[in-house]
Image: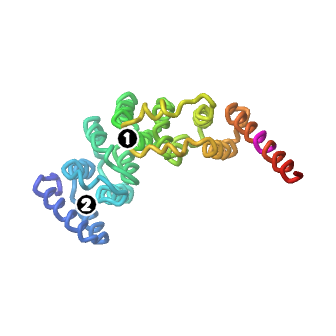
Amino acid sequence: MAGEDSAADMMQLQRELQNLWYKKDILKLRGVCREAFEKMSKPRTVVLSLLEKNPDWRRGKTSCLANHLTYELSKWLQCHADSLQPETLNTNLQRRVLRIIVDVVGPGLDHLVDLYCLKMLDKAELLTVVKGLVTTGRPKEAANLALKLELQPYLDFKEICQPLLLQDKLNIVELYVGSQEDMQKCLVQLLDSWCAPDFDHVVLFRQYQGLPQLKKEHLQPHKLSKTLSRLLKTYGISADFCPNLKKQRGLAAIKYLLFKKYREVCTCI
């Protein structure tokens, strides 16, 4: 593929990679990738074309052909950074990446963002993609992409994180929040609002009735209290920041004292 990255060469490479992937011959697959990159004039463009033509390469599992391909390209470019002619990354190429990136999971997402310098695109354009994922019921993908593109300050916290919490994906929310104090407070405030005595969980779940894997049991008071207590300790936030949790703890303490007194009376009788 020296000089020109022809369609025939790309098709041959596609078949070879597919065959090696089915055989799980990862060692040889890596070698084929490196040899192919050496011959390409525009390796990023060719790899993107391969991913566009083969959607099954990039879907489903963390271990997929797309992840291996982007990883090998990233590693190869790093090793040849001093000797390569720079490949032009225009906005049209980057927009093509945005159209497929929502299907990529795991480390492949990181490699695509870095390989194609997606953070340089207009923020409004990137935010549209993330919000589109939320609208179509893919909050996990939205959070992962927003995290990688560092878009959290420009997004509505509740819009991204509330559906994830209802799916019991607190681990993703904690990654999304990271060390940003304002979002840490948003998280504990949201969970505390769910501890309010008059909070209607039915109304909340009705908003997300089309969303899969909703876990209603995780909104039980004792589970929310346990989660909130851990987060307050982790983030170094005072319990005064969560008035509903304080009330819940106070009621629990009163109930315990009444129960203890009742047992003492019964024992005396």
Query: Quick one: 201 or 190, which is closer to the camera?
Result: 201
Task: Kindly identify which numbered label has been placed on residue 254.
Answer: none
- For badge 2, the amino acid type reads Glu
At x 35% / y 60%, what residue is drawn?
A: 63
Q: Which residues are magenta?
A: 253-257
Q: Residues within 10 Å of mark 2 (few under 14, many from 20)?
A: some
Quarter assignment of residue 80? bottom left
Residue 42 can be seen in this image: no
At x 89% / y 52%, what residue is drawn?
A: 268
- For badge 1, the amino acid type reads Arg
At x 63% / y 31%, what residue is drawn?
A: 197
Query: Quick one: 142 or 227, which is closer to the camera?
Result: 227
At x 29% / y 41%, what residue is drawn?
A: 89
**Front position among marks 1 and 2:** 1
Residue at label 1? 138
Q: Is residue 226 left or right of residue 24?
A: right
**Element under label 2?**
helix
Query: Quick one: 13 or 233, which is closer to the camera?
Result: 233
Disc 1 versus disc 2: distance between alpha carbons? 38 Å
Instruction: Please tell me whether residue 93 belongs to the stretch shown in magenta.
Output: no
Instruction: Please tell me whether residue 255 belongs to the stretch shown in magenta.
Output: yes
Pinpoint residue 113: horizontal percent, then vertical percent.
Answer: 38, 45
Residue at label 2? 38
